[in-house]
Image: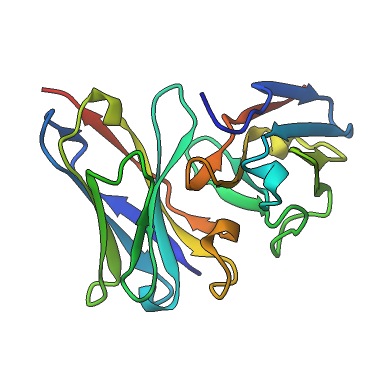
Amino acid sequence: QVQLQESGPGLVKPSETLSLSCSVSGISIRSYYWTWIRQSPGKGLEWIGYLDYSGNTKYNPSLKSRVSISADTSQNQFSLKLRSVTAADTAVYRCARVDGDYNTSFFYFYMDVWGKGTTVIVSS
Amino acid sequence: QSVLTQPPSVSGAPGQRVTISCTGSSSNIGAGFDVHWYQHLPGAAPKLLMFQNNNRPSGVPDRFSGSKSGTSASLAITGLQAEDEADYYCQSYDSSVSGWVFGGGTKLTVL
């Protein structure tokens, strides 16, 4: 059974870097694509970016200048870094596995396994 | 403001049928991109309910069905059960945003 667990600081100061990890169990991260999604209070879901099994990434253009996603295959986990955070980055952050036919465009992908999420508050 | 529009809430009595709409535009659903649906119970991880418009993952009851037409998609739930009470989200790709987009979510209440 594939399980994902997010971890990281629950409180980050404005202008600092938000760093989260997603630990994956039940399957090697080398076999799939992985993504981060967040949900701000009272708002809908927002896709942050994804990482493929070759280490390539694609980011939401609205966050691209501040975000990076990378993998640590030795720990079977992947991570999110979001720089220069503001209160607007306060949200529940969730990691998920990306599924679909990887031979087609990412236009058609979806998330088939999710973590429960971790709350990050940006405040001084 | 979400790119895909869903009704904030729907409700139905046990055994009834409800539908949840997901309205997009010519840059997402109307452009032919697939729609996927997720169920989110409080405190739990979201669950994939429907992928590629009308495909159910293993384990999802056939009470759930999906459809897509024009710039909209719908999730139908028949034989409503108390355990169906949750938030439901649709997802697609948007060429204007150049990324995956979601609906604002619909809270289903089983009366």
**Left of A53 or right of it: where is B106?**
right
**Left of B100 or right of it: where is B61?**
right
Image position, residue A24 (x, y; %): 36, 66
At 28% from the left and 31% from the top, the residue drawn is A89
Image position, residue A72 (x, y; %): 23, 70
At 11% from the left and 31% from the top, the residue drawn is A15
Q: Nearer the viewer, residue A29 or A56?
A: A56
Image position, residue B41 (x, y; %): 57, 38
Eyeballing the image, is B47 above or below B1?
below
Give residue A61's quadrant in the image: top left
The answer to whether any part of residue B45 appears in the image is: no
Image position, residue A43 (x, y; %): 46, 25
**Left of A83 or right of it: where is A36?**
right
Q: Quadrant of the C terminus of chain A?
A: top left
**Left of B101 or right of it: where is B14?**
right
The answer to whether any part of residue B41 appears in the image is: yes
